[in-house]
Image (cartoon, helix red, strand yellow):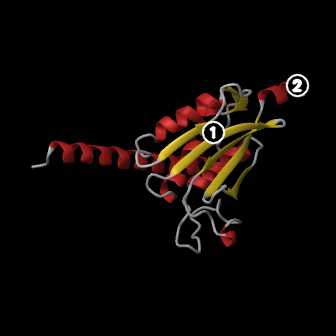
Amino acid sequence: MLSAQDTHELHELIEIEADRLTRLVTNLLDMTRIEAGVLTIQQAPTSVSEMVKEAINVMNSSAKDHQLRLEVSDSLPLANIDRLLIIQVIVNLLDNALRHSPDQGLITVSAQGRGSSLVVSVADQGPGVAPEDRESIFNRFEQSNTGGRAGLGLTIAKTFVEAHGEKIWYEDAPGGGARFSFSLPVLDALTAA
């Protein structure tokens, strides 16, 4: 017979694994839409702060062994994006950071204005990406020299960001680890043009 504590821990584990399976199935379905050429984006004015908070809420149960820090101002201009697709980008980047960060590691999600764009970043304290793997990190099912493997998450993130006419990139995080960043179109810049 399981103790109350063991039962609680088992339920938490089941919830985490169910969330992980749901994300995997979502990624597979998204990849199917991409390959079929039926990916469409529905852009609308979106609060980056609210969108990032929603993505973090999706990942809360999986992030219980990590520290999540949010560095996003509520005063950022609105982005002109497909909210659901960009939430999926952030979820995929968070999932990647959680898989590669040590327990109790800090994962920081930040956003800031840069000219006519907004830049959203997810940084972790994991091992980072070896220089020889940086060109292929966004390729589907890419095996790295350090034994890690990229699945569909980074490929889908890249595809969704590029569908908005924007870019996604990798850089070393200050103090070690990986930082994945992507740009988003600012609504004010688009309406002023």
Above or below residue 79? Residue 25 is: below
User: Horizontal and vertical percent for residue 138?
Assistant: 65, 59
User: Horizontal and vertical percent for residue 8?
Assistant: 24, 42
Residue type of the residue flagged with mark 2: Ala
Left or right of 101, for residue 189: right
Mark 1 Cα-neighbour bin, 10 Å: few <14, some 14–19, many ≥20: many
Disc 2 marks which residue?
A: 192
Residue in the image at 43% along x and 55% along y: 103
Quarter of the image for residue 169 reads bottom right
Residue type of the residue flagged with mark 1: Ile
Measured Cα–Cα span from mark 2 to mark 1: 23 Å
Residue in the image at 78% along x and 43% along y: 165
Residue in the image at 67% along x and 65% along y: 136
Quarter of the image for residue 83 reads top right
Disc 1 marks which residue?
A: 86
Element class at badge 2: helix
Tell me if residue 36 can be seen.
no
Above or below residue 127? Residue 33 is: above
Sequence-wise, the earlier of marks 2 and 1 is 1
Q: Which residue, as the protein is rendered here, is positioned at the far bottom?
A: 145
